[in-house]
Image (cartoon, rainbow, N blue to C red):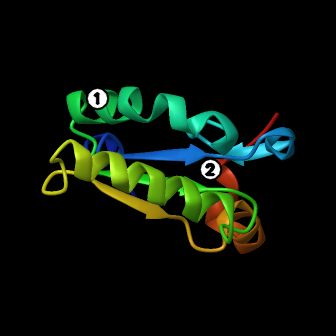
């Protein structure tokens, strides 16, 4: 994912589902949608991603052991309800933002400080 060009970049969306712990740093270009309010936005998120031909929606939180997988599951249900499973996937970023941040190196240039 780090070696992306403009064409590939448009094929995925990173969604940070952290709430207050979102403050400080995040992955460049990610969308902040706290999992506590995600349920009411699922259909809109699905429609936007479908219209933009986004193939992978990748959810993450701090460690991606709770909120990230829960959000990905909710969005996967929305994909199934709308018959979009052939065109879109709901995924979880392994180890979440903390894993991303700890990786350092090339990952640092894709991290923003708020």
Residue at 58% of width from left, 73% of height from top?
94
Q: How many marks?
A: 2
The relative height of residue 60 versus residue 5 in the rendered view (above or below) is below
Q: Is mark 2 on a helix, strand or loop?
A: helix
Residues packed near mark 1 inside 10 Å, few (<14), some (14 to 19) or many (20 plus): few
The relative height of residue 63 versus residue 21 in the rendered view (above or below) is below
- Per the rendering, the mark at residue 47 is 1
- Per the rendering, the mark at residue 78 is none
Q: Quick check: 60 left or right of 74?
A: right
Q: Quadrant of the C terminus?
A: top right
Q: Quick check: 22 left or right of 67?
A: right
Residue 85 percent location from the top left of the image: 19, 56
Residues packed near mark 2 inside 10 Å, few (<14), some (14 to 19) or many (20 plus): some
In this view of the protein, which residue sits in the foreground, 45 or 11? 45
Q: Is mark 1 on a helix, strand or loop?
A: helix
The relative height of residue 68 versus residue 63 in the rendered view (above or below) is above
Can you tell which of label 1 and label 2 is closer to the viewer?
1
Residue 71 seen in the current view:
yes
The relative height of residue 106 versus residue 52 in the rendered view (above or below) is below
Residue 1 seen in the current view:
no
Q: Mark 2 points at which residue?
A: 110
Residue 10 percent location from the top left of the image: 32, 39
Residue 32 percent location from the top left of the image: 64, 36
Q: Quadrant of the N terminus?
A: bottom left
Residue at 52% of width from left, 29% of height from top?
40
């Amino acid at each position: 994912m780090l070696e992306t060009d403009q064409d590939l970049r448009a094929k995925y969306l990173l969604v940070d589902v952290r709430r207050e712990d979102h403050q400080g740093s995040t992955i460049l270009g990610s969308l902040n949608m706290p999992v506590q309010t995600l349920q009411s936005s699922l259909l809109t998120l699905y429609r936007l991603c479908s219209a933009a031909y986004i193939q992978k929606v990748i959810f993450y939180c701090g460690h991606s052991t709770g909120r990230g997988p829960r959000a990905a599951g909710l969005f996967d249900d929305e994909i199934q309800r709308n018959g979009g499973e052939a065109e879109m996937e709901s995924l979880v970023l392994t180890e979440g933002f903390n894993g991303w941040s700890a990786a350092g190196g090339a990952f640092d240039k894709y991290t923003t400080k708020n």
